[in-house]
Image (cartoon, rainbow, N blue to C red):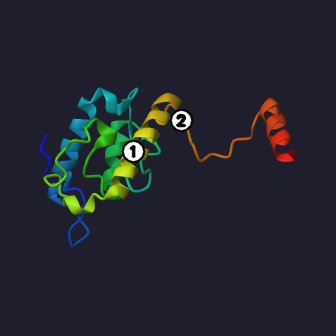
Amino acid sequence: MDNNRSWMYPRTDSRGLLNDAFVVGLDKFMNHVIAQPNSLNGTNIQCPCTKCKFKRHWDAKTVKLHLLKKGFVENYYVWNRHGEPYTVNRESAGQSSSSYSNISRERDENSQMYNMVMDAAGPNFNPHSEEIPNAEAQKLYDILNSS
């Protein structure tokens, strides 16, 4: 896989049309993702568009459409959520080594944790949902709140 990811963020040209390099690169990205069994959740793919931000899983056609319309989430030069190891040379991926600070490493570790939870919980899991607890759980919450 070519590690040059400079095509990922200039999605449109000055006229607002899709860049040819973006379209070609996106096709390569999608082929890479589909070829990585560990990046699939059943038949769905974690969506790296600016709206979904890895929180939703869609079929390949929908993910590609999202990326064409919205573009990639910021700084996703190393496709660690789509089967690529963390050891990819980040400089050839389009990022300078200075931009990968301790904060980025910490974010990578959080991503690993997030991926582990998402793998265990499945594609319909929403960690930010406000689910109403069942009666038994509500009793526990009430006890905790009263103490």
Residue 21 seen anywhere in this rendered image of the structure: yes
The residue under the point 25% across, 52% down is: 77
Residue 123 x, y percent position in the rendering: 49, 34
Please report whichever mark, 2 or 1, sits nearer to the chain's N-terminal start. 1
Element carrying mark 1: helix
Residue type, numbered disc 1: Glu
Residue 66 x, y percent position in the rendering: 37, 50
The residue under the point 38% across, 28% down is: 43
Which quarter of the rendering shows the N terminus? Answer: top left
Q: Quadrant of residue 94?
A: bottom left
The disc at residue 92 is none
The residue under the point 22% across, 37% down is: 32
Residue 125 x, y percent position in the rendering: 55, 37
The residue under the point 46% across, 43% down is: 56
Considering only vertical position in the picture, is 59 above or below 50?
A: above
Instruction: Please indicate whether residue 128 sits to the left or right of residue 14 in the image.
Output: right
Q: Which residue is mark 2?
A: 124
Spatial distance from mark 2 to mark 1, Cα to Cα? 22 Å
Residue type, numbered disc 2: Asn
- In the image, which is nearer the foreground, mark 2 or mark 1? 1
Q: Which residue is mark 1?
A: 109
The residue nearer to you, when weighing 111 against 133, is: 111
Residue 137 x, y percent position in the rendering: 77, 33
Do the residues bearing badges 2 and 1 touch, measured as CB atoms within 8 Å?
no
The residue nearer to you, when weighing 39 against 49, is: 39
Numbered-mark total? 2
